[in-house]
Amino acid sequence: MRVTSNDTSIYSLITPRKKASLSAESGINSLPQLQTNAPATLGKDRDVQISEFQARLAKSNFERNDLNGDGYVSRDEFTERNMQKRGSGYQASLEDVTKLWNSINRAGKDNLNEEEFATGFNTTLKVSMGSIDRPLR
């Protein structure tokens, strides 16, 4: 399968798209339409795009790790969530999850609120931007 587009940013590869639907009147499949809640990136500085993406990524991870919805991520919640077996069959070791928690939670607190989690997460995981110079094959 060949993927082509005029947009060569990696963001276009991870943006959800609507499935093609059959038009009852014309009998022709319509093209997939871009479906995203992400802010428009056209015309924005690369650093702004990166920081916005990093903020969304940190928020998403916080929400995924706050299992009881109390507004805090505890060591136990983080460990439970990150020790779950993935669909691919991969399961992180307790040692790896503990290292990640300690790098996010440098202050050694029992719980992290969203801002504290985002600060540690953003320090631990760095995002950069690139572009694809040729079509993917």
Image: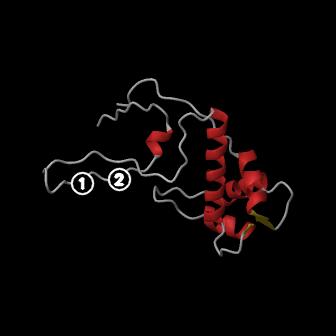
Which residue: 27% across, 51% down? Answer: 20
Other residues around mark 2 within 10 Å, as few (<14) / some (14–19) / many (≥20): few
Q: Secondary structure beneath disc 1? A: loop
Can you tell which quarter of the image residue 94 is in?
bottom right
- Are the two marked residues, 2 and 1, in contact with CB atoms closer than 8 angstroms? yes
Residue 102 appears in the rendering: yes
As displayed, is residue 47 above or below residue 115?
Answer: above
Which residue: 62% across, 33% down? Answer: 46
Residue holding disc 1: 21
Q: Quadrant of the C terminus?
A: top left
As displayed, is residue 71 above or below residue 32?
Answer: below
Residue holding disc 2: 18
Give the numbered dot on residue 118: none
Which residue: 45% across, 31% down? Answer: 8
Q: Quadrant of the N terminus?
A: top left
Q: Please indicate whether residue 66 sits to the left or right of residue 42 in the image.
A: right
Can you tell which quarter of the image residue 6 is in?
top left
